[in-house]
Amino acid sequence: MVEALFLDRIDLRILKELQRNARVTNQDLAIKACLSPSSCLQRVRRLEKNKILLSYHARVNLALICRHLLCIATVSLKNHSQHDFRSFEKRIRELPEVIECFTVSGEFDFFLKVLCPDMHRYLEINELLVGSNDYTVTISTHVVMNQNKHFDGFDIGSLYEMKDKK
């Protein structure tokens, strides 16, 4: 288990604002965090160095620029050996269309988000996953009709246990 880095209220404010707007200038971020610009930049760099801040992204409205298909797939491996899990995970990393993959508990083993230009490409990916000699897999696919809520960050303070309540 990884030991959590201590974050204070100022760090949490910085994370909240960067989730909301990663393009915020250091000057504006410092104002929102009630810090000097140099102290703010130092904290952001510490958060990056400690892998709390992993990357900065822009959410693109794909519907305005290209046709695409988003599928949610649940995957069950027949055998639950480490070898089969590692082989499947290796295959997933090789497919850029698999944009997210989670190992989960419950009725299936993996939850995948697959983004493709069309159903033909999705079927090719499905065949690549099912047709492996390294493992036996069952896939159930759900085509996303509409995304009703986007992830735009989360109030980390509601999850993070403040060790120092000052």
Image: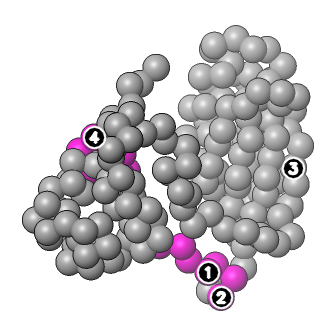
Disc 2 to disc 3, how far (Cα)? 25 Å
**Colouring scheme, one of rainbow, by chain, secondary structure, one colour:** one colour
Residue annotated with mark 4? 50
Indicate which label's residue lies in the foreground, 4 or 2.
4
Going from N to C along the chain, the mark reached first, 3 or 4, is 4
Which residue is at the front of the view, 131 or 148? 148
Looking at the rendered structure, the kind of residue marked 4 is Asn
Pointer 1 with pointer 2, Cβ within 8 A: yes
Q: What residue is at 77 percent from the left and 27 percent from the top?
A: 105
In the displayed structure, does residue 54 sit left or right of residue 86? left
Residue annotated with mark 1? 61
Going from N to C along the chain, the mark reached first, 4 or 2, is 4
Looking at the rendered structure, the kind of residue marked 3 is Thr
Residue annotated with mark 3? 141
Pointer 4 with pointer 2, Cβ within 8 A: no
Would residue 137 be counted in the magenta stretch?
no
Majority secondary structure of magenta residues: loop
Q: Residues within 10 Å of mark 2 (few under 14, many from 20)?
A: few
Disc 1 to disc 2, how far (Cα)? 6 Å
Q: Quarter of the image holding residue 138?
A: top right
Q: Residues within 10 Å of mark 1 (few under 14, many from 20)?
A: few
Looking at the rendered structure, the kind of residue marked 2 is Leu
Would residue 62 be counted in the magenta stretch?
yes
Pointer 4 with pointer 1, Cβ within 8 A: no
Image x and y of residue 67, in percent = 72, 79
Secondary element at tag 1: loop
Above or below residue 23? Residue 15 is above
Above or below residue 59? Residue 56 is above
- Considering every residue shown, the one lying at the far bottom of the view is 64
